Image (tube, helix red, strand yellow):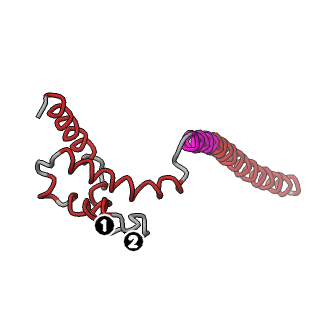
């Protein structure tokens, strides 16, 4: 084996290890392909057992390549149909940010209006209480003046 091939194999193992850290990815790849994405191709069929724990110990670079191509073959149609390609993900992020900012602004406006409502309700209660007191004082004054 040449030095370049050894380096390639080490790099393939390093990248495989990094990929295996993605939460849920291995579980997704272990599931049987129910969407027909494998098209019966031997690449994925051969790679299906690769994602089992014991097979991941020290795979060869060709085995990693076959498994990754099979995973790509299986996942590419889902990714392409989900719209997560090119600028659309950037557009989705901008739209999400825009909605989030608008929600925050509306929520703040709601809180301001809620505070104003509480203040006005408290003032209305004070006015009603003072009006009742004034009416009581007028009655008391009228009854005192009538004697």
Q: Is residue 21 magenta?
A: no
What residue sits 41% from the left and 66% below the top?
Answer: 39
Return the x and y of residue 38 as percentages of the image width and height: 38, 64
Magenta span covers which residues?
87-103
State whether residue 7 is above or below residue 73. above
Return the x and y of residue 55 as percentages of the image width and height: 14, 57
Q: Outermost residue, top direction? A: 3
Mostly what secondary structure, the magenta segment? helix
Q: For this view, does 70 lie left or right of residue 92?
A: left
Return the x and y of residue 81 as percentages of the image width and height: 53, 56
- Which secondary structure lies at badge 2? loop
Q: Which residue is mark 2?
A: 34
Comparing 68 with 6, the one in front is: 6
Q: Quadrant of residue 13?
A: top left
Q: In what quadrant of the picture does the N terminus appear?
A: top left
Q: Which mark is residue 31?
A: 1
What residue sits 75% from the left and 48% below the top?
Answer: 127
- Which secondary structure lies at badge 1? loop
What residue sits 59% from the left and 39% below the top?
Answer: 94
Q: Is residue 98 magenta?
A: yes
Q: Quadrant of residue 46?
A: bottom left
Check whether the beta carbons of the residues at disc 2 and disc 1 lie within 8 A of each other. yes
Return the x and y of residue 16 as percentages of the image width and height: 23, 44
């Amino acid at each position: 084996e040449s030095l370049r091939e050894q380096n390639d194999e080490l790099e393939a193992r390093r990248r495989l290890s990094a990929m295996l850290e993605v939460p849920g990815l291995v579980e997704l790849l272990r599931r049987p392909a129910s969407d027909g994405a494998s098209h019966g191709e031997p690449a994925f069929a051969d790679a299906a057992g690769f994602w089992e724990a014991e097979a991941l110990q020290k795979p060869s670079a060709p085995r990693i390549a076959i498994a990754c191509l099979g995973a790509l073959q299986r996942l590419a149609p889902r990714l392409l149909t989900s719209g997560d390609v090119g600028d659309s993900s950037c557009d989705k992020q901008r739209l999400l940010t825009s909605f989030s900012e608008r929600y925050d602004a509306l929520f703040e406006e709601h809180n301001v209006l809620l505070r104003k409502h509480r203040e006005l309700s408290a003032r209305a209660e004070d006015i009603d209480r003072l009006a009742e007191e004034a009416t009581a004082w007028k009655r008391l004054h009228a009854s005192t003046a009538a004697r």
